[in-house]
Image (cartoon, rainbow, N blue to C red):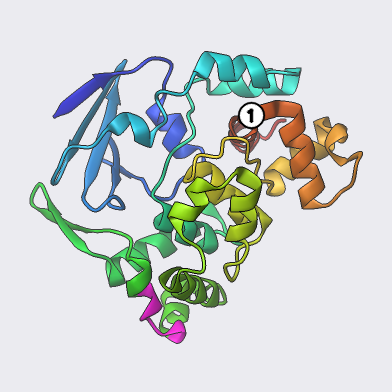
Amino acid sequence: MREIVVKKFSLRDTLECGQTFCWTPHGQGYLSTDWGQVIYVEQVGNRLRYKTSDHDERIESFFRLDDPIDKIHDEICKDDTMRRAIEFAPGLRIVSDPFFPCLVTFLCSIRNNIPSIRRLAWRLREKYGPAYEFEGSTYRGMPSAEELARVPTQELRALGLDWRAEFVSRTAKAICEGLVTEEELRASDYEEAHEQLKRLHGVGDKVADCVCLFSLGFLEAFPIDVWIERVIQRHYEIFTQSGKSYAKKSKAAREYFGQYAGYAQEYLYYYTRSTGRG
């Protein structure tokens, strides 16, 4: 098993905070099958240990271990609420998940809870995904856009996606047709990428922000869901002074927290959801 030394990092908080559905608990750590192979990772003290089913990976990139975490904390810690959220999970990092699996799982997240999202993602992998052998067992990864585009919408509905099946099916077809490409999104600025993603069926402001933040690396993205909305109402009246639309609140949050607003969002989300406070 390979290993690297990490500083100010918590694998558990990073993968249990609700920002990713591409990693699942496994053994003493976590496993992902969405990178074209199986990747297992665990943390023992300040060491991150990992192994793969095929080729080596730069594990640092998956968890943004090169991000200047002290600078990020300093820049976003603008009030007591944010200070408490950072102190609750100071080792939390924003993930860098593969684009299409991230997009599909957040389409599954619309009006849904975390256990159900994980179940739907697992069913998609088991039914349509590629198979990988790892330590004597077979695991399946998220199917490609091409594979999902071939699946009848009714079949996806029967799998449990219900009305979300239309979102997944039409989005997969649009990706195959080149309506939106990962390369173009990464070459864009945040606002352009956000608008391009919303061209996909079922992708609204929140899902677009999640993909921008958790896959494309736009750290200024500030997804707003019911948990973040509660924090805004209780502690950040400034976010609604210019208007109550999603776009205006998100813009206000980005202006308030700055270039690392996405980190602020995830600390607030995890802290509020875990403690019931905010």
Image position, residue 180 (x, y; %): 51, 63
State which quadrant residue 74 falls in. Answer: top right
Residue at position x 29%, y 32% in the image:
59
Residue at position x 37%, y 73% in the image:
148
Q: Is residue 112 above or below residue 41?
A: below
Q: Is residue 236 left or right of residue 55?
A: right
Q: Is residue 107 above or below residue 135?
A: below
State the count of labels: 1
Q: Is residue 204 left or right of residue 155?
A: right
Image quarter (top left, top right, bottom left or bottom right) of the C terminus: top right
Image quarter (top left, top right, bottom left or bottom right) of the N terminus: top left
Q: Mark 1 sits on what residue?
A: 259
What is the crowding at mark 1: few (fewer than 14 residues within 10 Å), some, or many (at least 20)? Answer: some
Image position, residue 241 (x, y; %): 91, 38
Q: Is residue 133 left or right of residue 28?
A: left
Q: Is residue 142 above or below residue 194?
A: below
Visible in this render: residue 251? yes
Which residues make up the magenta segment? 148-154
Q: Is residue 86 above or below residue 226?
A: above
State which quadrant residue 176 falls in. Answer: bottom left
Visible in this render: residue 19? no
The residue lying furthest to the left in this view is 136
**Amino acid beneath label 1:** Gln
Residue at position x 58%, y 31% in the image:
263
Image position, residue 252 (x, y; %): 79, 37
Q: Is residue 152 a member of the stretch shown in magenta?
A: yes
Q: Is residue 248 left or right of residue 217?
A: right
Q: Is residue 179 a member of the stretch shown in magenta?
A: no
Residue at position x 51%, y 52% in the image:
185
Image position, residue 267 (x, y; %): 60, 30
- Element at badge 1? helix
